[in-house]
Image (cartoon, helix red, strand yellow):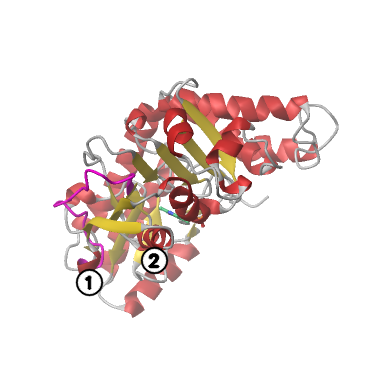
Amino acid sequence: MSARAHTFFAGPAILPVSVLEDTRDAVMDFAGLGVSIIEVSHRDKSFDKVIQEAQADTLAIAGLSAQEYSVLFLGGGASMQFAMVPMNFLRKKADYINTGEWSGKAIKEAKLIGEVIEAGSSKDSKFNHLPTALKFSPDADYVHITTNNTIYGTEWKTIPDARNVPLVADMSSDMFGIQRDFKKYSLIYAGAQKNLGPAGVTLVIIRKAWMEANGSTTIPTIMRYKTHADGLSLYNTPPVFGVFVLGRTLKWIMKEGGLTAVQKRNEAKAKLIYDAIDAHPSFYKGTVVHPADRSLMNITWTLPTPELEEKFLAEAKAKRMLGLKGHRSAGGIRASVYNACPMESAELLASFMNEFARANGH
Ligand SMILES: *Cc1c(COP(=O)(O)O)cnc(C)c1O
């Protein structure tokens, strides 16, 4: 295998080397059974252990109890959750906070089911900040928030108070990258391929009481959260491989010292890169206007011209830094520095940014 590159892709994204090694081994021989993890039955006892530990570890890291919450591993990506959430819970109206492309897609799906109120939006300023003047409807079925905006580089560090309305969060790109009060949420979902595992599995944490009392019972069986919760996420064949890798990543998070340690390292990595942006204000322009809104996970900035951005990307690639091109809808540069991104990669990127600015007259 060639030496590892410095990986800044937004998703699918970097995973810890030890997780890749465990996965490689399990692909060849899972649990000493002489079969691959991708050959074993999801009903086999050996896989029960994998899925049950992944559920228990998710709750342990989040500080939640199995009495109150169910953990599900579903297919369909976070995008399917955009539809499942309103199908299950939107009766009359729901509040959505519009902070980017992904929120917009969630809103679009919810509008197919019921009334959507935008409790706040930063669309008019190209999502370059998080809206502050939020207006919640006291009678909403739920409030939906996107905790980290993968494309525009904003992240809610403090979650606005939706009072007594159930809170639903798309945490796809910062799930377990930052400590949160997970008890505040009635439903959390996260496509694993950003910060937790491979594409193909979506983590869902749902408050049982809310699901039991409010989940629709007339939508197709597979679309109901209750179906998956009652079946311990084995109603149909779960994404076995994805669950395995996600499970290994959870063990890695715990070994690293849990969310406090992980967040501290993420803050240090992000600071290196934001400092490099701020050190050359006539050359690099951060796309997020309020420093408090800056994401720890996805760092976005522009250079003076598209030509300089191309040159920046080419030189970075020559130094084996991959995945720095901004999202096609936002342009510019984006460095995704998820949990598994090593400090050395952030250091290398920051020092390259300083060099590149100087070499180009700044
Ligand atoms: C990537 C992403 C999605 C879409 O995830 P899929 O798994 O591709 O459906 C949704 N929300 C956020 C915040 C994302 O970053």
Dot 2 crowding, Cα within 10 Å, few <14, some 14–19, many 20+: many
Task: Report the span colored magenta.
Answer: 125-144
**From the viewer's perspective, is residue 160 above or below residue 71?**
below
**Residue under label 2:** 326
Position of residue 316 measured from the top left corner of the image (x, y, whole percent): 43, 63
- Please tell me whether the stretch drawn in magenta is mainly helix, strand or loop: loop
Could you say whether the residue bearing mark 1 is in a helix, strand or loop?
Answer: loop
* CA gap, disc 1 and disc 2: 23 Å
Q: Amino acid at mark 1?
A: Gly
Q: Residue at x 33, y 78 (%)?
A: 306
Q: Amino acid at mark 2?
A: Gly
Q: Nearer the viewer, residue 86 or 299?
A: 86
Give the tally of numbered discs. Answer: 2
Q: Position of 65 compared to 285: left or right? A: right
Snapshot quadrant of residue 63: top left
Position of residue 212 measured from the top left corner of the image (x, y, whole percent): 48, 32
- Tell me if residue 137 is in the magenta stretch: yes
**From the viewer's perspective, is residue 279 above or below residue 231?**
below
Q: Position of 159 compared to 18: left or right? A: left
Closer to viewer: mark 1 or mark 2: 2
